[in-house]
Amino acid sequence: MSIDKEAVPDGSNIFHQEFHIGHVENLVPAATTVVNNYYYGTRAKPQNESLDPTDRKSIREEILHYVERTIPHVDYSWKDKYMALWADILDLTEVSNVIYDKGRQEGSRFNWKEVCHILCYLGRYANGGLGIFQKYVALYIANSLDEGKAHTIRPELGFRPSKEIQHAIDKLMKEKYTLA
């Protein structure tokens, strides 16, 4: 067994722990060594509050432009209120806490995974379980969002957002929009 400590310039420490197993009944090379890495200390994480209000506004416009690409798939009864619904969704506290934090995602200034999760919820479960899309097919939505480019968003279009966000969207739709 060996334990190594590595200091990182940001003030955190990384501990590397390695175990060597001496006797194994059925030899499987992957089962003879176990490596665990532990990260202790503070790691710099971007916070939503650090966004300049003009940055937040431009990111909001970017998100609205991004979801606007899905309008051809929206049910006829929702086409006129779809973008207003998205503007209201972005104003929800539960959504704004996560949507403007891109995390580890590269090539985007917003959390596109959460946008995809909300699209999945709107497409399959919102509006009393009927959804607001004519037919929710993740492939079609992914092609619209990425304009035919190969991207990793298709799997994300199959997941729902957190329960908090789901309840906030349901409450918004009940209060402000007529449900089917």
Image (cartoon, rainbow, N blue to C red):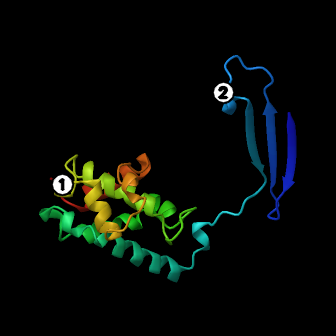
Count of numbered circles on the image: 2
Task: Spot the residue most to the top.
Answer: 25
Depicted 58 relative to depicted 147: above or below: below
First along the sequence among labels 2 and 1: 2
The amino acid marked with disc number 1 is Lys
**Quarter of the figure with residue 30:** top right
Q: How dense is the environment of label 2, judged by Cα within 10 Å: few (below 14), some, or many (20 and up)?
A: few
**Front-most of residues 57 and 27:** 27
Q: How dense is the environment of label 1, judged by Cα within 10 Å: few (below 14), some, or many (20 and up)?
A: some
Percent across and percent down for residue 151 are 41, 62
**Quarter of the figure with residue 90:** bottom left
Helix, strand or loop at mark 2: loop
Helix, strand or loop at mark 1: loop
Percent across and percent down for residue 47 are 61, 66
Percent across and percent down for residue 159 are 38, 48
Depicted 162 relative to depicted 142: above or below: above
Q: Is residue 104 left or right of residue 19?
A: left
Residue at point 32% right, 71% down? 147
Residue wearing tag 2: 28
Residue wearing tag 1: 135
The amino acid marked with disc number 2 is Val
